[in-house]
Image (cartoon, grey):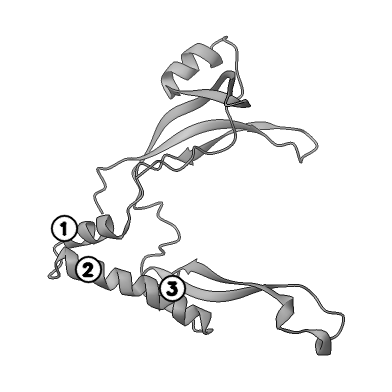
Amino acid sequence: MDNNIKLKVNLYKHTNTMGETQETKWYGNVVRTATYDMAALSRHIAQHGSIYTQDVIYGVLRKLGNCIPELVAQGIATKLEGLGTFYPMVKTTGADKASEFTVANVKQVIMQFTADRNTQEDVSNLTDKANVEINDVKVLLGTKVIDGEERKIYDHIKVANYVKLYEDGGSDDDPDPEPDPEPEP
């Protein structure tokens, strides 16, 4: 992993409305810079010195994308060492008696994923691999009606500028507690 590439984190302020104190604190959200589809992922893997070409890697990933759901739907957990395990779960409605429980009680069969924690490197915790950079503060500018719907308008400003403008005596608008939507690929 190239540790020179920064993992950017935007700050936002959130007030805990569930607690007694209604305490406001600052939190961070990862800035997702891209979403790789299988073609982009296969190119990336091929660039890591693989003996396999991008088209071969792509083909394997496509098969993987077909085979894992097929196996999971049959009750077979599938482990990818160093990554994690895909496994089946069901969402059901309850029955008063075991004898009354039928297939109709199974409302959904879903595929779950658990990151691999039993390897040399715990892939569920990438803290040691990430090169974190605090990026921006998400600031609420106001609202605007767009297509008949009121929407919040935000700006992202550099942390140092935010501190100068708002924490050194300026007004403090509440940044949105919701993370930014995933960027387009």
Judge from the rendering whether residue 157 lies leftward or rightward of residue 143; answer left or right.
Answer: left
Pick whichever, 26 or 90, lies toward us: 90
Q: Quadrant of residue 182?
A: top left
How many numbered dots are placed on residues in this image? 3
Q: Quadrant of residue 94?
A: bottom right
In space, the residues marked 1 and 3 are separated at their CA atoms by: 27 Å
> Which numbered circle lies on residue 57?
2
User: Which amino acid, by three-letter code, is at mark 1?
Assistant: Gln
| Of the image marks 3 and 2, the number of the one nearer the N terminus | 2
Residue at position x 16%, y 58% from top?
Answer: 47
* Tag 2 secondary structure: helix
* Tag 3 secondary structure: loop
Residue 136 location (% of width, % of height): 43, 28
**Vertical relation: 38 (above or below) 68:** above
* Tag 1 secondary structure: loop
Residue 116 location (% of width, % of height): 44, 69
User: Which amino acid, by three-letter code, is at mark 2?
Assistant: Ile
Residue at the extreme top: 169
Residue under pointer 1: 47
**Vertical relation: 57 (above or below) 177:** below
| Of the image marks 1 and 3, the number of the one nearer the N terminus | 1
Which image quarter is the C terminus in? top left
Residue at position x 37%, y 70% from top?
Answer: 65
Q: Is residue 80 visible?
A: no
Pick whichever, 160 or 40, lies toward us: 40
Residue under pointer 3: 118
Residue 40 location (% of width, % of height): 26, 55
